[in-house]
Image: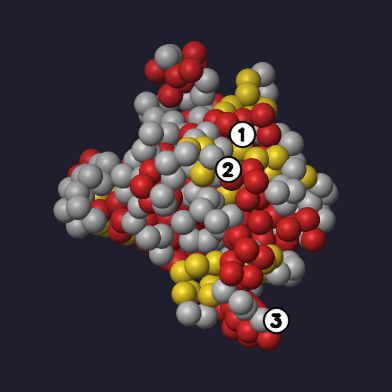
């Protein structure tokens, strides 16, 4: 079979690894092509995502042919057959390794910046690539994970040659591959889209980290959500959806992905159960929705480790904005900033004047009724606030570029008021 792209391959691979969910797992993707695959696996397993930066040691006269590989802090892995066949001496091998380690260090810093690597000590490490050819880089990544104290190493790839277990040897404790084939020529032959993954895409995926499914207790009910906590995040934004929407809202997912790429954590959740959503009265019960937001806020602050001092912001859409402002008005609320997208701040009623945290109201210029309500709400807000009007946009911001403008405004507001990524 052929995969449509690396994301589809990652989802297929994640299905083979489902038994590892909840097993103290860290997912390491091999840059660059292995990272989009690893991101899907990390999301499905609810595990953190990092990179295993590895460099191939190419033959001097034939660089595309691997005679070995090196990984961060890991030992050199050598393909003795290739080295012997090409009559490579130790001095030449050392020179190639030195050059590749310099490039390895450069790339590791480019991908992570100043963020530390995620600890793998005493954890199950899943090393992921988009496919396996010679196996040199995968073996190097597995050996490096062992050197860093991994309790168990699992090597997982969507496709590999039939004899891949022999090529890997004892480098991993477990091998997972849904498609090991005899007629293997190259990894790319098994993908409809095998376009090169860019460094920028790798950085964006790492900043988003591995989103994980969570369940948040809220009184007598449990709310399903999706939590993303990039390494170094100083703040997390909790989303309050509008009527008839939920954690899968494409507009809010779009905003959440951009915030995660900027280094902010996000929590997308349903504020009502399916049964509750069927009753329209609940959709407009702003007090109930605000109470659920408060529960989610307490939960995310308690479960944000190792992100000590994590600050919380609210992104509210439509009726969800009313709930966000209602919850933020509580004198005990720890919320540091609120953004309202096409929101109904009027639904916060008298509590609007009690909001103390910086608040940004974003409204479409052609959303006339909601714009009128937001201008009236400005008169009640005594906190630092701003009203931004997106010209030509209607209520859901479907116009070209409109939602991107909302996203940029929200990102800058949260980064300003929740602190920069990695800040204190």
Q: Position of residue 108 (x, y in %)?
A: 59, 71
Q: Position of residue 196 (x, y in %)?
A: 37, 60
Which callout, 3 or 1, points to the residue nearer the camera?
3
Residue in the image at 42% along x and 25% along y: 284
User: Callout 1 environment at 10 Å: few (<14), some (14 to 19), or many (20+)?
Assistant: some
Label 1 to label 2, Cα distance in Å? Answer: 21 Å
User: Callout 2 environment at 10 Å: few (<14), some (14 to 19), or many (20+)?
Assistant: few
Q: Position of residue 140 (x, y in %)?
A: 67, 61
Residue 74, quarter of picture: bottom right
Task: Tell whether label 1 touches label 3 (CB within 8 Å).
Answer: no
Kindly state the secondary structure of the residue where label 2 is placed.
Answer: loop
Residue 350 drawn above or below residue 217: below
Which callout, 1 or 2, points to the residue nearer the camera?
2
Q: Earlier in the sequence, mark 1 or mark 2?
A: 1
Residue at numbered disc 2: 163
Residue 90: image tag: 3
* Residue 76 visible in the displayed image: yes
User: 42 left or right of 148?
Assistant: left
How many badges with numbers are in the image? 3
Residue 104, quarter of picture: bottom right
Residue at numbered disc 1: 17
Residue 269: image tag: none
Task: Tell whether label 2 touches label 1 (CB within 8 Å).
Answer: no
Q: Earlier in the sequence, mark 3 or mark 1?
A: 1
């Amino acid at each position: 079979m052929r995969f449509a792209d690396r994301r589809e391959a990652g989802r297929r691979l994640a299905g083979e690894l489902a038994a590892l969910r909840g097993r103290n797992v860290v997912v390491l993707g091999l840059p660059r092509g292995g990272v989009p695959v690893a991101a899907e696996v990390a999301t499905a397993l609810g595990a953190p995502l990092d990179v295993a930066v590895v460099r191939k040691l190419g033959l001097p006269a034939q660089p595309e042919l691997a005679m070995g590989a090196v990984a961060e802090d890991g030992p050199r892995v050598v393909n003795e057959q290739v080295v012997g066949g090409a009559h490579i001496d130790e001095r030449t091998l050392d020179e190639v390794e030195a050059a590749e380690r310099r490039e390895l260090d450069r790339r590791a810093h480019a991908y992570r910046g100043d963020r530390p690597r995620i600890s793998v000590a005493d954890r199950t490490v899943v090393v992921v690539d988009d496919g396996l050819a010679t196996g040199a880089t995968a073996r190097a990544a597995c050996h490096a994970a062992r050197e860093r104290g991994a309790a168990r190493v699992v090597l997982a790839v969507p496709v590999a040659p039939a004899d891949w277990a022999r090529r890997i040897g004892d480098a991993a404790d477990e091998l997972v591959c849904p498609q090991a084939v005899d007629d293997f020529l190259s990894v790319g032959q098994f993908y409809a889209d095998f376009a090169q993954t860019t460094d920028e895409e790798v950085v964006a995926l790492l900043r988003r980290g591995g989103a994980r499914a969570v369940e948040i207790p809220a009184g007598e009910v449990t709310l399903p959500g999706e939590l993303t906590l990039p390494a170094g995040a100083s703040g997390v934004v909790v989303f309050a959806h509008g009527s008839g929407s939920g954690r899968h809202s494409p507009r809010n997912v779009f905003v959440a992905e951009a915030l995660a790429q900027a280094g902010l954590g996000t929590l997308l959740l349903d504020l009502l159960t399916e049964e509750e959503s069927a009753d329209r009265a609940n959709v407009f019960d702003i007090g109930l929705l605000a109470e659920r937001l408060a529960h989610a806020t307490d939960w995310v602050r308690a479960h944000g480790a190792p992100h000590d001092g994590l600050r919380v912001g609210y992104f509210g859409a439509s009726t969800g904005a009313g709930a966000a402002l209602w919850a933020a008005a509580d004198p005990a609320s720890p919320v540091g900033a609120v953004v309202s997208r096409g929101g109904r701040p009027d639904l916060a009623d008298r509590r609007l004047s009690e909001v103390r945290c910086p608040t940004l109201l974003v409204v479409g210029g052609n959303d006339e009724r909601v714009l009128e309500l937001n201008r009236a709400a400005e008169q009640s807000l005594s906190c630092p606030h701003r009203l931004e009007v997106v010209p030509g946009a209607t209520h859901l911001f479907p116009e070209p570029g409109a939602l991107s403008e909302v996203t940029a405004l929200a990102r800058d507001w949260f980064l300003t008021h929740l602190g920069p990524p990695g800040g204190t």
